[in-house]
Structure formats: C-alpha cells, structure tokens
Amino acid sequence: MITLTKEDGPADLDGVTHLSIGASWDPTSGASGGVMGKLRRKTGTDLDLIAIALHDGDPVRLAGLDSLDPIGNGSLLHSGDNQTGHGDGDDETVTVEFAKIPPHITSIVFIAAAYKKGSSFQKARNISFKVYDASGGSTQQVADIWPSMLTTDNGCAVAKAVRSGSGWKLEVINVTGKIKQGDELALMRFAASK
C-alpha cells in the first residue's frame, strides 16, 4: 500500500492498476441565518473535480464538466456532476486505469474548481479530496487532502500522476489559484502550470 503526503514528494504507483480521486464538500449558509441560510444550504454550491490529461505539458483531454469518458476506452472516467454537495461520501470521483492510458499521455493533473459562475469555495465547507488505490476491485484510501479554508481562490490543483518509465508516480500538490469561471482555456492553463 502507498501512503501519500505533499511532504513525501512523488510516490511510485507500483502495483496500483486503478486509482480514484474523490472530492467531497458540504453546502454552507455562509454568514446567513434564517430563511436565506436555509435556502443557501438547500441549493448548495457546485464544485467540480476535473482531470486533465497532458502530452508533454499540453492539455489533450479533459474528464469532468460534461465529459465523462474523454479518451473513449474507460481509462479516465468521471462519475458525473454533483451540483450541490449534498449526500454522504465523495460527491464527484475520477478513476484512472493506468494500463489503458494511451502512451502519448505523459501526465494527468487533478483539479477541483468552483468553475461555474456563482459557485465558490466560500459557499462550501469541509472540502476534502481523497485518493484511493482501487486495484483488484477493492478501494483503499491512501491520502486525505484538505485545502485551506482561508483561501479566496477558486481552483485547487489536488494531485498529479506522471508517467515514469513503464509505470506511474503520483504527487500530492494541494496548491490553490484563481481560474476565470466558465473559461475552459484558463482551466487548462492552470493544469499545465502544475
């Protein structure tokens, strides 16, 4: 089993055939109580977990938003869009099957973003990202990543998988930044800079 922390640097994924990253958050009322607070909690906020596959630093495929299987062979799958944060467990997940990733994909960056207009990290509480070794049909958590609650940014580069010879390495990044909402090119530039 691997254990991942930002301080440890990249970890070899030897023996890991399937990797899943999950994002979860709870809706918050912000500073509002009463009717407005209840309404904000009920409607929640829409955060997005996105995986961007890169070839030598250039984004070539995006899993998330409205693309659930961007490579078309099941190697990079998104669970679908949770627009509120309601429910238990992970609200959105991305699963990678490394053996099926085409050889020209050299890295995959996993990003969480308040991508759509009107959404924000400040409208969510208890944001966390979990990394799972999903090899062999079982799921075992290997990392739990919590971004700062003080950030006013709307994007977080969670982790990056990098091809290393015939295998892969995974690095926890947990770095926030600003992404122009609704701008897919800005999202891809953010991923490419990590």
Image (tube, helix red, strand yellow):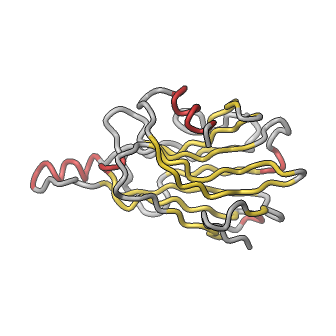
Most distant residue in the left direction: 34
Q: Work out whether residue 159 or residue 128 is closer to the camera in this orientation and state it.
A: 159
The C terminus: image quadrant: top right
At x 70% / y 62%, what residue is drawn?
134
User: In the figure, 104 relative to 158: above or below?
Assistant: above
- Measuring from the top left, give residue 138's x and y in whole percent: 70, 68
User: In the figure, 8 relative to 176: above or below?
Assistant: below
Q: Work out whether residue 149 or residue 43 is closer to the camera in this orientation and state it.
A: 149
User: In the figure, 64 relative to 148: above or below?
Assistant: above
- Measuring from the top left, give residue 148's x and y in whole percent: 41, 59
- Measuring from the top left, give residue 185's x and y in whole percent: 55, 26
Q: Work out whether residue 190 or residue 68 is closer to the camera in this orientation and state it.
A: 190
The N terminus: image quadrant: bottom right
At x 83% / y 65%, what residue is drawn?
15
At x 56% / y 62%, what residue is drawn?
130
- Measuring from the top left, give residue 102's x and y in whole percent: 82, 38
Q: How many numbered tags mark residues here?
A: 0
Most distant residue in the bottom direction: 1
- Using the rendered view, name the quadrant where residue 53 is placed: top right
